[in-house]
Image: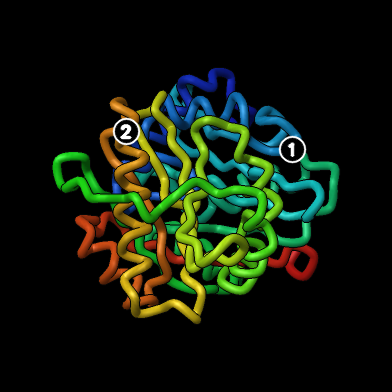
Amino acid sequence: MQQLTIQPPVSLEELARYIEKKNKQSKHHIGYCGEKASEILDSLENDFSDLGVMKSFLVVLRGEEIVGALGFDVDLEDQSAEAWGPFVNEEEDGGEVAGELMRRLLASIDIPLERIYFFINERNKQARKFLADIEAEEKGGHLILKIKRDRFIGVDTNEVQPFSASFKESFSQLHQSAFPDAYYHADDILGFLGDPHKDLLIIKDGNQLIKGYSYIEANPEHGEGDLEFIAVSPLYRKQGIGTRLVKASVQKLFHHDAIADITLCVSKENDQAIHLYQAAGFDLIHGVVSFEWRVTKDR
Protein backbone atom coordinates (compact mmCIF):
# COMPACT_ATOMS: atom_id res chain seq x y z
CA MET A 1 0.00 0.00 0.00
CA GLN A 2 1.28 3.45 -0.86
CA GLN A 3 2.39 5.64 2.03
CA LEU A 4 0.63 8.92 2.80
CA THR A 5 2.37 12.22 2.07
CA ILE A 6 1.39 15.50 3.73
CA GLN A 7 2.39 18.70 1.93
CA PRO A 8 1.06 22.05 0.66
CA PRO A 9 -1.23 21.68 -2.38
CA VAL A 10 0.49 21.36 -5.73
CA SER A 11 -2.64 22.35 -7.67
CA LEU A 12 -5.31 24.66 -6.25
CA GLU A 13 -7.65 23.52 -9.03
CA GLU A 14 -7.31 19.91 -7.87
CA LEU A 15 -7.81 20.96 -4.24
CA ALA A 16 -10.94 22.92 -5.16
CA ARG A 17 -12.38 19.90 -6.98
CA TYR A 18 -11.63 17.69 -3.96
CA ILE A 19 -13.36 20.09 -1.55
CA GLU A 20 -16.35 20.39 -3.90
CA LYS A 21 -16.70 16.59 -4.01
CA LYS A 22 -16.54 16.31 -0.22
CA ASN A 23 -18.68 19.34 0.55
CA LYS A 24 -21.58 18.09 -1.55
CA GLN A 25 -21.93 15.20 0.94
CA SER A 26 -23.50 15.97 4.31
CA LYS A 27 -21.25 13.42 6.00
CA HIS A 28 -18.17 15.45 4.95
CA HIS A 29 -19.67 18.95 4.67
CA ILE A 30 -17.87 21.94 6.21
CA GLY A 31 -19.85 25.17 6.40
CA TYR A 32 -17.14 27.71 5.53
CA CYS A 33 -16.01 26.37 2.17
CA GLY A 34 -18.71 26.52 -0.50
CA GLU A 35 -19.90 23.71 -2.75
CA LYS A 36 -18.83 24.80 -6.24
CA ALA A 37 -15.26 24.24 -7.40
CA SER A 38 -15.15 27.61 -9.20
CA GLU A 39 -16.23 29.47 -6.06
CA ILE A 40 -13.83 27.50 -3.86
CA LEU A 41 -10.94 28.14 -6.26
CA ASP A 42 -11.70 31.86 -6.34
CA SER A 43 -11.60 32.00 -2.53
CA LEU A 44 -8.37 30.03 -2.38
CA GLU A 45 -6.67 32.25 -4.96
CA ASN A 46 -7.94 35.63 -3.77
CA ASP A 47 -9.37 35.61 -0.25
CA PHE A 48 -7.88 32.75 1.73
CA SER A 49 -5.84 33.57 4.85
CA ASP A 50 -3.71 36.58 5.74
CA LEU A 51 -0.72 34.26 5.30
CA GLY A 52 -1.63 33.09 1.80
CA VAL A 53 -2.97 29.72 0.83
CA MET A 54 0.38 27.93 0.42
CA LYS A 55 1.31 28.66 4.05
CA SER A 56 -2.18 27.91 5.35
CA PHE A 57 -3.25 24.66 3.67
CA LEU A 58 -2.02 21.07 3.73
CA VAL A 59 -3.23 18.09 1.73
CA VAL A 60 -2.79 14.36 2.25
CA LEU A 61 -1.71 12.42 -0.82
CA ARG A 62 -1.79 8.69 -1.48
CA GLY A 63 0.33 8.57 -4.59
CA GLU A 64 -0.95 11.54 -6.57
CA GLU A 65 -4.52 11.39 -5.23
CA ILE A 66 -5.73 13.82 -2.55
CA VAL A 67 -7.28 11.80 0.29
CA GLY A 68 -7.40 14.51 2.95
CA ALA A 69 -7.05 18.25 3.46
CA LEU A 70 -7.09 20.96 6.12
CA GLY A 71 -6.68 24.71 5.83
CA PHE A 72 -6.70 27.62 8.27
CA ASP A 73 -8.18 30.90 7.01
CA VAL A 74 -5.98 32.99 9.30
CA ASP A 75 -6.92 36.42 10.67
CA LEU A 76 -3.62 37.89 11.89
CA GLU A 77 -5.18 40.82 13.72
CA ASP A 78 -7.51 38.58 15.71
CA GLN A 79 -4.94 35.75 16.03
CA SER A 80 -7.64 33.30 15.01
CA ALA A 81 -8.53 31.08 12.07
CA GLU A 82 -11.54 29.45 10.46
CA ALA A 83 -10.86 25.81 9.62
CA TRP A 84 -11.56 24.48 6.13
CA GLY A 85 -11.81 20.86 7.14
CA PRO A 86 -10.68 18.44 8.26
CA PHE A 87 -11.58 16.50 5.13
CA VAL A 88 -10.48 12.85 5.16
CA ASN A 89 -11.55 10.00 2.85
CA GLU A 90 -13.53 7.21 4.51
CA GLU A 91 -10.90 4.54 3.78
CA GLU A 92 -8.28 6.44 5.79
CA ASP A 93 -8.04 6.54 9.59
CA GLY A 94 -9.92 9.83 9.86
CA GLY A 95 -8.96 10.78 13.40
CA GLU A 96 -5.28 9.95 13.04
CA VAL A 97 -4.95 11.71 9.68
CA ALA A 98 -6.88 14.77 10.87
CA GLY A 99 -4.75 14.97 14.01
CA GLU A 100 -1.52 14.81 12.01
CA LEU A 101 -2.79 17.50 9.63
CA MET A 102 -3.63 19.72 12.60
CA ARG A 103 -0.23 19.22 14.25
CA ARG A 104 1.74 19.88 11.08
CA LEU A 105 -0.31 22.89 10.05
CA LEU A 106 0.04 24.50 13.48
CA ALA A 107 3.78 23.80 13.45
CA SER A 108 4.18 25.38 10.01
CA ILE A 109 2.47 28.64 10.97
CA ASP A 110 5.03 30.90 12.58
CA ILE A 111 2.55 33.21 14.33
CA PRO A 112 0.69 32.34 17.55
CA LEU A 113 -2.97 31.47 17.02
CA GLU A 114 -5.29 31.76 20.01
CA ARG A 115 -8.51 30.26 18.61
CA ILE A 116 -9.58 28.10 15.70
CA TYR A 117 -13.23 27.99 14.68
CA PHE A 118 -14.93 25.02 13.05
CA PHE A 119 -18.32 24.95 11.27
CA ILE A 120 -19.28 21.30 10.86
CA ASN A 121 -22.34 19.68 9.34
CA GLU A 122 -24.34 17.97 12.06
CA ARG A 123 -24.13 14.74 10.00
CA ASN A 124 -20.34 14.91 9.72
CA LYS A 125 -19.66 12.29 12.40
CA GLN A 126 -16.00 11.92 11.45
CA ALA A 127 -15.18 15.59 12.03
CA ARG A 128 -17.37 15.85 15.12
CA LYS A 129 -15.55 12.90 16.72
CA PHE A 130 -12.21 14.55 15.95
CA LEU A 131 -13.36 17.79 17.58
CA ALA A 132 -14.58 15.90 20.63
CA ASP A 133 -11.17 14.18 20.86
CA ILE A 134 -9.32 17.53 20.92
CA GLU A 135 -11.91 18.95 23.35
CA ALA A 136 -13.16 21.73 21.11
CA GLU A 137 -16.07 23.61 22.67
CA GLU A 138 -19.44 23.40 20.95
CA LYS A 139 -20.85 26.92 20.57
CA GLY A 140 -24.26 26.42 18.94
CA GLY A 141 -26.32 25.04 16.09
CA HIS A 142 -27.27 26.79 12.87
CA LEU A 143 -29.35 26.12 9.78
CA ILE A 144 -28.31 26.87 6.20
CA LEU A 145 -31.32 27.81 4.08
CA LYS A 146 -31.55 28.32 0.32
CA ILE A 147 -34.09 29.76 -2.10
CA LYS A 148 -34.05 29.07 -5.83
CA ARG A 149 -35.16 31.56 -8.44
CA ASP A 150 -38.19 29.50 -9.49
CA ARG A 151 -39.46 29.49 -5.88
CA PHE A 152 -39.61 33.27 -5.58
CA ILE A 153 -42.57 35.52 -6.38
CA GLY A 154 -41.78 39.20 -7.01
CA VAL A 155 -42.99 41.89 -4.62
CA ASP A 156 -43.44 45.67 -4.40
CA THR A 157 -40.26 46.99 -2.75
CA ASN A 158 -40.86 50.76 -2.91
CA GLU A 159 -40.57 51.14 0.87
CA VAL A 160 -37.10 49.56 0.87
CA GLN A 161 -34.26 51.81 -0.28
CA PRO A 162 -30.46 51.86 -0.48
CA PHE A 163 -28.51 53.04 2.55
CA SER A 164 -27.46 56.70 2.67
CA ALA A 165 -24.91 58.39 4.92
CA SER A 166 -27.45 60.15 7.18
CA PHE A 167 -28.40 56.74 8.60
CA LYS A 168 -24.84 55.70 9.55
CA GLU A 169 -25.26 56.12 13.32
CA SER A 170 -28.67 54.44 13.40
CA PHE A 171 -27.40 51.49 11.33
CA SER A 172 -24.22 51.09 13.38
CA GLN A 173 -26.15 51.02 16.66
CA LEU A 174 -28.68 48.48 15.37
CA HIS A 175 -26.03 46.20 13.87
CA GLN A 176 -23.94 46.25 17.04
CA SER A 177 -27.01 45.51 19.14
CA ALA A 178 -28.28 42.70 16.91
CA PHE A 179 -24.88 41.10 16.08
CA PRO A 180 -22.34 42.03 18.78
CA ASP A 181 -19.94 39.20 17.84
CA ALA A 182 -20.50 39.20 14.08
CA TYR A 183 -17.73 38.45 11.57
CA TYR A 184 -18.48 41.85 9.93
CA HIS A 185 -18.71 44.95 12.11
CA ALA A 186 -20.78 47.95 11.02
CA ASP A 187 -17.71 49.79 9.69
CA ASP A 188 -16.74 46.71 7.66
CA ILE A 189 -20.14 46.65 5.95
CA LEU A 190 -20.09 50.39 5.28
CA GLY A 191 -16.63 50.01 3.76
CA PHE A 192 -17.94 47.38 1.33
CA LEU A 193 -20.60 49.60 -0.21
CA GLY A 194 -18.44 50.82 -3.06
CA ASP A 195 -18.59 47.28 -4.45
CA PRO A 196 -21.47 47.04 -6.97
CA HIS A 197 -22.20 43.48 -5.81
CA LYS A 198 -22.76 44.45 -2.15
CA ASP A 199 -25.83 46.31 -0.92
CA LEU A 200 -27.19 47.63 2.35
CA LEU A 201 -30.96 48.04 2.18
CA ILE A 202 -33.00 49.93 4.77
CA ILE A 203 -36.54 50.83 5.75
CA LYS A 204 -36.37 54.27 7.33
CA ASP A 205 -38.27 56.32 9.87
CA GLY A 206 -37.68 59.96 9.08
CA ASN A 207 -34.32 61.26 7.93
CA GLN A 208 -31.95 59.63 10.43
CA LEU A 209 -33.51 56.53 12.01
CA ILE A 210 -33.97 53.16 10.40
CA LYS A 211 -36.61 50.60 11.27
CA GLY A 212 -34.56 47.74 9.89
CA TYR A 213 -31.86 46.78 7.40
CA SER A 214 -30.50 43.91 5.36
CA TYR A 215 -26.97 43.46 4.02
CA ILE A 216 -26.60 41.31 0.90
CA GLU A 217 -23.75 40.13 -1.32
CA ALA A 218 -24.18 39.05 -4.94
CA ASN A 219 -21.76 36.60 -6.51
CA PRO A 220 -22.99 36.43 -10.13
CA GLU A 221 -19.72 34.89 -11.34
CA HIS A 222 -20.62 31.76 -9.39
CA GLY A 223 -24.39 32.07 -9.74
CA GLU A 224 -25.03 32.71 -6.04
CA GLY A 225 -26.16 35.41 -3.65
CA ASP A 226 -26.06 35.70 0.13
CA LEU A 227 -28.33 37.45 2.59
CA GLU A 228 -25.67 38.07 5.22
CA PHE A 229 -27.48 40.11 7.89
CA ILE A 230 -30.99 41.31 8.58
CA ALA A 231 -32.20 43.14 11.70
CA VAL A 232 -35.26 45.09 12.81
CA SER A 233 -35.18 47.65 15.61
CA PRO A 234 -37.09 46.51 18.72
CA LEU A 235 -39.24 49.65 18.39
CA TYR A 236 -40.66 48.45 15.05
CA ARG A 237 -41.08 44.73 15.43
CA LYS A 238 -44.28 42.83 14.61
CA GLN A 239 -44.99 45.23 11.74
CA GLY A 240 -43.90 42.93 8.89
CA ILE A 241 -40.66 44.87 8.35
CA GLY A 242 -38.48 41.75 8.42
CA THR A 243 -40.64 40.03 5.82
CA ARG A 244 -40.46 43.03 3.50
CA LEU A 245 -36.69 43.29 3.88
CA VAL A 246 -36.20 39.58 3.13
CA LYS A 247 -38.34 39.72 0.00
CA ALA A 248 -36.74 42.95 -1.20
CA SER A 249 -33.27 41.47 -0.64
CA VAL A 250 -34.09 38.32 -2.57
CA GLN A 251 -35.59 40.36 -5.40
CA LYS A 252 -32.51 42.63 -5.52
CA LEU A 253 -30.17 39.64 -5.74
CA PHE A 254 -32.26 37.97 -8.44
CA HIS A 255 -31.86 41.11 -10.56
CA HIS A 256 -28.53 39.47 -11.44
CA ASP A 257 -29.59 37.03 -14.15
CA ALA A 258 -26.69 34.69 -13.36
CA ILE A 259 -27.81 34.11 -9.77
CA ALA A 260 -29.77 30.89 -9.51
CA ASP A 261 -30.04 30.61 -5.73
CA ILE A 262 -29.52 32.53 -2.50
CA THR A 263 -28.28 31.16 0.81
CA LEU A 264 -28.33 32.32 4.41
CA CYS A 265 -27.39 30.99 7.82
CA VAL A 266 -29.51 31.39 10.95
CA SER A 267 -29.29 30.17 14.54
CA LYS A 268 -31.14 26.91 15.08
CA GLU A 269 -32.79 28.51 18.11
CA ASN A 270 -34.20 31.47 16.17
CA ASP A 271 -37.63 30.03 15.41
CA GLN A 272 -39.06 33.40 14.38
CA ALA A 273 -36.37 34.01 11.75
CA ILE A 274 -36.58 30.44 10.44
CA HIS A 275 -40.34 30.79 9.99
CA LEU A 276 -39.82 34.16 8.27
CA TYR A 277 -37.33 32.75 5.75
CA GLN A 278 -39.31 29.60 5.04
CA ALA A 279 -42.44 31.69 4.48
CA ALA A 280 -40.48 33.66 1.88
CA GLY A 281 -39.63 30.43 0.03
CA PHE A 282 -36.34 29.32 1.60
CA ASP A 283 -35.74 25.58 2.08
CA LEU A 284 -33.57 23.89 4.70
CA ILE A 285 -30.33 22.57 3.19
CA HIS A 286 -27.98 21.80 6.09
CA GLY A 287 -27.81 21.79 9.85
CA VAL A 288 -24.37 22.87 11.07
CA VAL A 289 -22.67 23.15 14.46
CA SER A 290 -20.00 25.72 15.38
CA PHE A 291 -17.01 24.86 17.58
CA GLU A 292 -14.16 26.85 19.11
CA TRP A 293 -10.77 25.36 19.96
CA ARG A 294 -8.46 27.30 22.27
CA VAL A 295 -5.02 26.68 20.80
CA THR A 296 -2.90 28.09 23.61
CA LYS A 297 -4.65 25.94 26.19
CA ASP A 298 -4.38 22.67 24.27
CA ARG A 299 -1.20 22.98 22.24
Judged by depth in the image, the label closer to the viewer, 1 or 2, is: 2
**Residue at image mark 2:** 255
Residue 146, position in %: x, y?
Answer: 28, 50
Is residue 27 visible in the rendered image? The answer is yes
Circle 2: residue type: His
Up the image or down, 54 lies above or below 132; here it is above
**Residue 167 or 52: which is nearer the viewer?**
167
Residue 284, position in %: x, y?
Answer: 25, 59
Q: Say which residue appears at 59% left-offset and 60% top-offset.
A: 207
Instruction: Say how many tags the image has.
Output: 2
Circle 1: residue type: Asp
**Residue 262 or 131: which is nearer the viewer?**
262
- Left or right, 247 with respect to 227, comes to left
Q: Residue furthest right?
A: 111
Up the image or down, 109 lies above or below 174; here it is above
Query: Mark number for residue 284?
Result: none
For disc 1, the neighbor class at 10 Å (few under 14, some 14 to 19, many from 20) is some
Q: Say which residue appears at 44% left-offset and 77% top-offset.
A: 236
Q: Say which residue appears at 81% left-offset and 50% top-offset.
A: 77
Query: Mark number for residue 50?
Result: 1
